[in-house]
């Protein structure tokens, strides 16, 4: 349980090949109540090849209730998969982050994947599910449920857009796999 910090819950700066898994970031110990950090849940600054989440339920992070965004990334080769971002531990109740679920400021990264285990639930956030900014180039966003509950059938929409590309280039949203 990583909550109620006056800045970010977790900050990786100039670090690489770290793994963040199995945490409640911005929630209580049960993953059901908003105990958000004042900043982002996770902030990667100039980090490379870090992994947030994993392919099994035990590796899942619940990243919700934070006062900025769930995850912000400046870096290359980072992977975000298997997490609940903006929901409670069940993936069916809105515990949104105050801004966006995932923000990629710059770099080439992956959100989700082609298997069910890689699926993120990115829902209930007050602004965007996923926001790719001008320095975001060549990112892949696929296989995640954005704006729905864990079943993919109930509405847990993000406040503004599911995915927004704001001047980013050569990014892939979705895919055939």
Image (cartoon, rainbow, N blue to C red):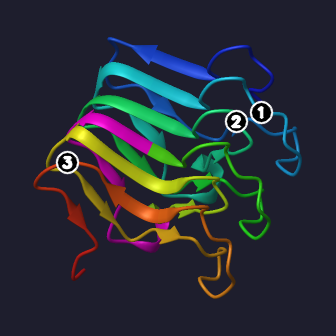
The disc placed on residue 66 is 2
Q: Position of residue 67 (x, y in %)?
A: 69, 33
Cα separation, mark 2 vs mark 3, equals 25 Å
Q: Earlier in the sequence, mark 2 or mark 1?
A: 1
Label 1: how many residues lie within 10 Å, few (<14), some (14-19) or many (20+)?
many
User: Which SS class for mark 3?
Assistant: loop
Q: Residue at x 67, y 45 (%)?
A: 97
Foreground mark, 3 or 1? 3
Q: Is residue 165 above or below residue 30?
A: below
Q: Position of residue 156 (x, y in %)?
A: 68, 72
Toward the viewer: 56 or 131? 131
Q: Earlier in the sequence, mark 3 or mark 1?
A: 1
**Extent of the magenta region:** 103-117
Question: In the image, is 120 to the left or to the right of 89?
Answer: left
Residue occupying the far left of the picture: 170
Toward the viewer: 26 or 6? 6
Q: Which residue is mark 3?
A: 168
Q: Is residue 105 magenta?
A: yes
Q: How many marks?
A: 3
Q: Residue at x 22, y 51 (%)?
A: 139
The disc placed on residue 36 is 1
Among the 4 quarters of the image, the one containing residue 41: top right
């Amino acid at each position: 349980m990583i909550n109620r910090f006056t800045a970010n819950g977790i900050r990786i700066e100039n670090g690489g090949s770290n793994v963040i898994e199995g945490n409640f970031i911005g929630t209580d110990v049960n993953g059901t109540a908003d105990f958000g950090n004042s900043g982002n849940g996770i902030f990667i600054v100039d980090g490379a090849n870090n992994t947030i989440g994993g392919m099994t339920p035990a590796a899942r992070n619940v990243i919700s209730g934070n006062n900025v965004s769930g995850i912000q990334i400046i870096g290359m080769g980072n992977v975000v998969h298997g997490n609940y971002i903006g929901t409670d531990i069940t993936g069916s109740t809105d515990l949104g982050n105050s801004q966006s679920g995932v923000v990629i400021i710059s770099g080439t990264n992956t959100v989700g994947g082609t298997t069910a285990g890689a699926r993120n639930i990115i829902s209930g956030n007050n602004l965007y599910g996923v926001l790719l900014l001008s320095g975001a180039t060549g990112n892949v966003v696929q296989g995640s449920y954005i704006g729905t509950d864990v079943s993919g059938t109930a509405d847990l929409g993000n406040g503004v857009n599911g995915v927004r590309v704001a001047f980013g280039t050569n990014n892939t949203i979705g895919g055939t796999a």
